[in-house]
Image (cartoon, helix red, strand yellow):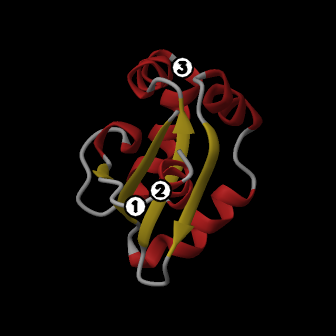
């Protein structure tokens, strides 16, 4: 399993609208994400617009490729693209990823070997 964490920044004047859009994500987009192999997907939004996303997948390259090729994804990303600060293109392809430096379960598993 591969854990992915990423960062984006929502425009401060669009935060309420962004929250509203994500309270009811299009059903076809939810299915596209699930079909791509992503699971345990969450977004966290700070009051200043910092957005942190997290998901798990078995093959992130395959997941990204599946989403990039899916027309349902393109429509959602086009609708969302104007929400982000200094971002060219589709958010799912241009988010800054963060390196995982600690995971409790991984370290406990090593300790119990």
Image point 32% across, 48% down: which residue? 95
Farthest residue, direction front: 113
The label shown at residue 71 is 3
Q: Are marks 1 and 3 in contact (CB under 8 Å)?
A: no
Mark 2 or 3: in front is 2
SS under mark 3: helix
Q: Badge 1 is on which residue? A: 102
Q: Is residue 32 above or below residue 20?
A: above
SS under mark 1: loop
Residue 7 screen position, x and y as percent: 36, 59
Q: Is residue 110 above or below residue 49?
A: above
The label shown at residue 107 is 2
Residue 37 screen position, x and y as percent: 60, 25
**Relative to 22, 78 lies left or right:** left
Mark 1 or 3: in front is 1
Q: CA distance from mark 1 to mark 3?
A: 36 Å
- Nearest the viewer among 48 and 65 is 65
Q: Which numbered disc flags the more N-terminal residue, 1 or 3?
A: 3
Q: Are marks 2 and 3 in contact (CB under 8 Å)?
A: no
Q: CA distance from mark 2 to mark 3?
A: 40 Å
Image point 38% across, 23% down: which residue? 61
Residue 88 screen position, x and y as percent: 24, 45
Q: Which numbered disc flags the more N-terminal residue, 2 or 3?
A: 3
């Amino acid at each position: 399993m591969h854990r992915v964490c990423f960062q984006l920044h929502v425009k401060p004047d669009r935060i309420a609208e962004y929250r509203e859009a994500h309270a009811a994500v299009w059903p076809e987009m939810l299915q596209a994400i699930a079909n791509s192999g992503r699971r345990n997907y969450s977004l966290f939004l700070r009051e200043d617009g910092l957005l942190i996303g997290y998901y798990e997948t078995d093959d992130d390259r395959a997941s990204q490729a599946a989403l990039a090729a899916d027309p349902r994804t393109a429509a959602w990303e086009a609708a969302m693209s104007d929400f982000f600060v200094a971002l060219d293109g589709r958010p799912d392809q241009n988010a800054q990823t963060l390196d995982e430096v600690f995971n409790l379960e991984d370290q406990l598993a090593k300790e119990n070997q």
